[in-house]
Amino acid sequence: MIRQQRTINKEILFEGTGLHTGNASSIEVKPAPPNAGIKFVRMDLENRDEIPATIASVPAESRPYRQTELSRGNVKIFTVEHLLATCYGLNIDNLVIELKGEEPPEPPDGSCDAFVQAFKEAGFKNQGVPCDIFEIDRTVSHKNGGVELHAYPCDTFKLSFSIEYENKHIGSQHASFDITPEVFVNELASARTFVLMEDVEHLRKAGLIKGGSIENAIVFTDKGLLNDEPLRFPDECVRHKILDLLGDLALLGSPVKGHIHAVRSGHATNIDFIRRLWEVKESRTRTSDLLKKGQWDINVIQKIMPHRYPFLLIDRILELEDKKRVVGIKNVTINEPFFQGHFPGHPIMPAVLIIEAMAQIGGVLLLSSVDNPERYLVYFTQINKAKFRKPVLPGDQIRFELELLTLKRRICKMQGHAYVDGNLVAEAELWSTIVER
């Protein structure tokens, strides 16, 4: 499970009314550079401090009820979960969200559909930098009364949720999904906020749902659905619970690899659980300086490329521009197994292995541009115009620079150059195709 960080191609403006405050508000969503994360800025205030969308920005004294809150000092932002769920569901990692008001505008139907449409119209941009994936490697649990949340190791990102209501029109529901952008859009984004009629007055007295209406929420009575529009899914309520949990999980600041299972949870217990996951995440080795610089270290490379000793000939990716170019290095040492026979007493790196290393670095460029790259291989189909200018010796560091010339479906053509100490040692034109394993 590895992918590039992603932002949007152009700015988005979204206007409306806050669900709980009932106040008019607007957001202007802007692209952000790699490793920036998602940040909110209150543009209606004089001091326009950035508020990172991480669990560290959720006030410790906050007990979220029906919404998730972020703050910095005295500046607060309410009900961020639907917007963050959309970002997480669409694999968007870096944004600046300029907000006028205390609360992002609620989509008109109480789902994430309008946010999804706006993001899709803006388009997405891969940023050539790997995501820092938070992998669940042991069970983490949180229990509070009848509420349970568990995180388990898993090869994918999976969310499961179980709810149980006395209202017979909701009753007991369970759903489980492997979360991908396609699953998010087709199965979760259109699930609407729901409420019991008996809770409406209590929520209003608590100063909430001032912007709520029959148009932006599903309302259940003892007799059934109050809305004219029928349910979009038989289990729409539990799907919306998954959507809320997804928005809260975005506060981890990293995509998750693992299985999260929630039972009867809401925002308050979601936040308690995410704080526990955050502690686990922070206790591990922090993101390397290489990753922060946008470089792909050997651990990330091995998640993309199938090669292993003695045939993995890449040490690091220094630069990667999605579907355009890649720069990587190979450190050549006397311990390379091929030096035993090529040649004893006069070690020279075989020219064919220089081309192989060049091809592998090109393979990272190709595989990093597809979803689930671990499911694919790169077959090189043709080598043209290969030239070898100088020998490569033990102690050299080869810098490979490859440019993507053409890409049609899964067939591509690249031009590669190899340098040692700034001197050209080899070049070639490489053709390849991506195939499923």
Image (tube, rainbow, N blue to C red):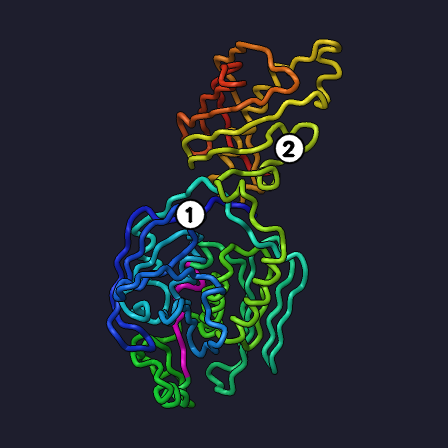
- The answer to whether residue 26 is visible is no
At 28% from the left and 58% from the top, the residue drawn is 28
* Magenta-drawn stretch contains 109: no
At 64% from the left and 30% from the top, the residue drawn is 312
Does dot 1 land on a helix, a strand or a loop?
Answer: strand
Q: Position of residue 75 (x, y in %)?
A: 35, 69
Q: Are marks 2 and 1 in contact (CB under 8 Å)?
A: no
Q: Is 350 displayed left or right of 47 in the figure?
A: right
The mark found on residue 145 in the picture is none
The C terminus lies in which quarter of the figure?
A: top right
Q: Quadrant of residue 162?
A: bottom right
The mark found on residue 307 in the picture is 2
The boundaries of the magenta stretch are 185-195
Q: Quadrant of residue 311?
A: top right
Task: State whether residue 102 is above or below residue 33.
Answer: below
The mark found on residue 6 in the picture is 1
Sequence-first tag of 2 and 1: 1
Q: Position of residue 118 (x, y in %)?
A: 30, 56
Does dot 2 land on a helix, a strand or a loop?
Answer: loop
- Disc 2 to disc 1, C-alpha distance: 26 Å
